[in-house]
Image (spheres, helix red, strand yellow):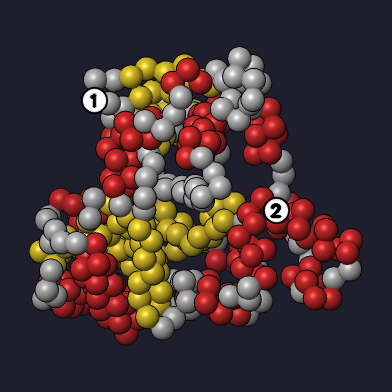
Amino acid sequence: GDAFLALWKTDKRTFLCHTIHAVIACALVIQHSYSSYETDVKVNLKVKLAISAGNLLFAPIGTGIDMNYVVFGLPVIEAKAAESVCASGEVKLTATAWGHCYSRNYDHLVHDDGHVTIKSILYDPHEIDVTKPFIGFGAMIRQIKKPFNGIENLPDFLWDSKSLNSTDLLKKNETLNLRKTILIAEEKNIGSDIRKFMVRPVLTQVDAHQPLKYLTEMRQVSILFITLKPRDCPYPQFITIVNNSYQITCEIVYKSMGCVNKIILFDKDVMILVIFGLRGFKHESEAQAALKCAYNIKKSVSALDGVLEVSIGVTTGQVYCGVVGHPLRREFTVIGAVVNKAARLMCGFR
């Protein structure tokens, strides 16, 4: 199955229990809306959600135009452990997250392993009247069902805030208010910095002023799924190992006309997804290039101080390529049996 990692930031002005409550409410709405979701091809998707809380480390890695970032820490590890014992249709909290909650606010079940299953919300911790029952998720459900065609069709001139009148500026802010970081990024003029984190096919499309939907297609590609296991060490050293491994991988991949798509970090194992054959990076011997690239990555990264193990799965075939996600939060990805097989090969021959 596919996994998503969502983060809620808590600042000094916010109680952690209130943030966790918002996350619980969001998780219950997701279960209400998509716990058994039938796709267009009649496949039922089921959802399980795990919630943790605590301090995370966020680290940018890479150099030049090949930047990425990793998020890691005990909450990620605990969330993964909770997800592994979570059944489809459940919302499960770790013991750490539950320790910040008021138990009376939730219909819940505490398990022997310390995890807590949340069935429903009884009271809202934001209410001054602690006896007032929770009124439900009406507003949140209406929000997720709201069509976002307006965002998709936002005229180009609205992105130039300096030339907007008050009416157009209000319209723009209302449209983008769901993800305020976009407005903050524009205000601070950090577009050139964001470009460093965009995969090259998307960047090429953006620079050509072409719709991102043109990147959506079924395409013959070669996939590298790479996992590396760093040694146990303090976080600063760990980040150095990950950063060095990522930079070496990017250098080898781009010399072979491939693209580093994403990097994932769970339980201190690092996984990197590499794609050969994307639009603008197509060549006849890409499968051969992928194999040579895999060999060179394994040889070079394995030689790094602190890397205990490198395993790579390589496959070739038809996959879905494209930009997925909400109009305000998207990423480029590849989906298909070929990708899954590469991941299984990577895990099966370690």
Which residue is nearer to you in this view: 93 or 259? 93
Q: Residue at x 35, y 24 (%)?
A: 116
Name which residue type carries label 1: Asp
| Residue bearing mark 1 | 113
Mark carried by residue 177? 2
Quadrant the N terminus occupies: top left
Q: Residue at x 89, y 61 (%)?
A: 167
Left or right: 123 in relation to 152: left
Q: Residue at x 15, y 51 (%)?
A: 348
Q: Position of residue 181 (x, y in %)?
A: 60, 60
Seen in the picture, residue 162 relative to 109 is either above or below; the reply is: below
Element type at marker 2? Answer: helix
**Residue 232 occupies quadrant:** bottom left
Seen in the picture, residue 97 relative to 300 is either above or below; the reply is: above
Left or right: 343 in relation to 303: right
Mark 2–mark 1 Cα distance, whole angstroms, equals 40 Å
- Taking the image as drawn, is residue 44 in sight? no
